[in-house]
Image (cartoon, rainbow, N blue to C red):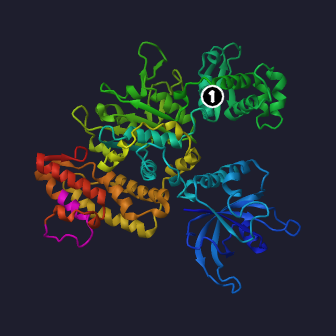
Amino acid sequence: MRIYLIKVNNAEVVRRTVDSERFTHDGIYNFEQDIEVGDAVFIYLGGDRSLIDWSQGIRGVGKVVATPYDKGYDTNRPRNFKIDIEPTHILADSIPPKSTKIHKQLASQLYDIPYVGANHFPNQAIASSTDETGIRALVSVYQEYGDYQFLQFPDLAGLVEPPSGLPASRKHYARIATALQAKRFLILTGLSGSGKTLQALSFCKWLSPPTDSSRFALLETSLLSEEFQANYEVVSFSSELVEVINRNGESGKIIPLPTQAIYEWHDALKGGLIANNDDPKAVRHDIGEGSRYQKHIHGFYNELFKLAVRMAEATPATNEKMLSCVHLVPVGADWTSSEHLLGYPDALQSKSYRKPDSGVLDFLLRAKGDPSTPYFLILDEMNLSHVERYFSDFLSAMESGESIHLHDDDGQLWDGVPAELPIPANLFVIGTVNVDETTYMFSPKVLDRANVIEFSVSEAEISTFLEGPYKPDLREIEGAGSIYADGFLQSAMQSAVRLEPEHHEKVAQVLRGFFPHLEQVGAEFGYRTAYEIYRYVFFNREWVGSEWDFQTCMDEAIYQKLLPKLHGSKRRLQPVLDSLTRLCLKDGVIGESDQVSDELLRKENALYWNSLVKLRKMAIRLSEQGFTSFAEA
């Protein structure tokens, strides 16, 4: 996808733009071979100020809906052609050049590219930007001036490169993102040292806000600080409301503090409007002048001020692990119950709760209190212990949407822990898996509830790495993709997705073809898997964009949702592997009575190449050892 900027001054075109109606943009002579349907277009309203009744500047964003046509319609300018544009987001007023804070983000990205800028932009010209800064400019407009929706421009995220030195690509990012949007539980498996954990950390840190940018995490740190707790009991806190009781007060009443009111005081402190040694009673009028929380500011100024000061002081010294939206937990071989994730009530002390040393429970509570931000829990070497023993309650709650029971005192917090805790909808879980003699295999129940992506290292990849081996620095990309975080989360939370009829039927045909063969060995799929494959295809198309290919996408879906449950002996599995191999070949490559041979298993013969290779590896292991499984082949 390319990004263009057009400038128009025709009154009718301006009217249609403002009314979000499709319009024709003519008089164009450049980028004829480049413009494609789906490309993004900044729409700039121009014209002579003394003659127009609209404001000049960027008015919104649209999409190309008809590629260059009607070339030569103007006999005096035979090179000229037309395109059609459909506005997708139009602002209430134009963003004037050189005058708004958004301009700082756009200056080097739009106003300095060819044809753009005061008095240098022909009326009907079109300018183009293809680099990452243009992408960021587009998203910045949405963030500053409207509601950015991830699916409005599907190619955006795929245009940002992973960090240098990381054995990854945009393709890997798209696959991980798609898998997580289709299902919030992802398993990464493969050769030890192939970069599974690094890939997970890379993607999650790229998409998450920088560690010091989460105000809710700062607020949580402040509420739990010894200084604040010495004077106040924290009854409850969420992303909307904090409730505390003054330990030194006589009434014992709960003090309600809207988080936005706390943030107003914090902003005033950071911006220099007030100082941490000011009298809160004296400065409350400065803050309350334009606030929606007049009642709270004038009634609870002491509490608001103290929390704002705590937040300001916590900023430079706060533990990075506490602020991060990414939490990496090494799974221990002794994990035999959910206590390592969720803790347990203290049997020796009434109304006390023992939180796990892993920090997972605190991470879940923070995610619950910050629902507009994606949180990523990475369980490293997940199968070092029996997954079902420590993860079944967690997985069941993720699947059903029901809450996990933590203690019996309904409505009360024990050391900040509620009696019931639902798995937050903004929590995504990634497990990394090694398969060797020290680890345990996953049950079909676990595999059925996850996407499974396998990482391997080819001879060419290791050769490239050996030319200049070094460990990549993930700090290069931390927060670089955070502009996509909200859209990523909103898309993942969509309960219903709708494929185009053509692709819907194609998916159905593939699943109908695989089902009876998988059923022969008890590896058939149910409604859940079918639904999640549809979701995967839907989101994958949005991520990959114009380079999307159905066969490649379906190959990935087959590999990570249908094949992982395959395991068994030669007598049981051999006929099924042969049948599935045939399904991965193009029509006409092999006859019904022909034997599957290595000569036929070439890329040009394959419908689903990666699945075909995996099935062949499983067949070879089956022949050599009499038993095979997806994980071991």
Residue at the front extreme, as displayed: 467
Crowdedness of circle 1 by 10 Å Cα count: few (<14), some, many (20+)? many
Q: Is residue 257 visible?
A: yes
What is the magenta range? 577-594
* Residue type (three-letter) at the residue carrying disc 1: Leu
> Relative to 7, is 529 above or below?
above
> Relative to 293, is 485 above or below?
below
Which of the pair 541/123 is nearer the observer? 123
> Relative to 96, is 267 above or below?
above
Which residue, given by chain and number where applicable, does mark 1 sit on?
219
Q: Where in the figure is residue 4, as x and y percent of width and height? A: 63, 63
Which of the pair 83/410 is nearer the observer? 83
Residue at the bottom extreme, as displayed: 75
Mark 1 residue element: helix
- Location of the N terminus by quadrant is bottom right
Q: Main secondary structure of the magenta part?
A: loop
> Relative to 452, is 544 above or below?
below
What's the residue at 34%, 35% (across, down)? Answer: 382
What's the residue at 78%, 56% (across, down)? Answer: 96
Query: Based on the displayed image, in which of its 4 quarters is residue 378 positioned?
Result: top left
Task: Say whether residue 331 is left or right of residue 258.
Answer: left
Q: Is residue 402 visible?
A: no
Which of the pair 562/497 is nearer the observer? 562
Q: Where in the figure is residue 460, as x and y percent of width and height? A: 32, 50
Residue 213 lies in the magenta stretch: no
Task: Say whether residue 18 is left or right of residue 550.
Answer: right
Which of the pair 228/324 is nearer the observer? 324
Q: How many marks?
A: 1
Q: Where in the figure is residue 426, as x and y percent of width and height? A: 51, 42
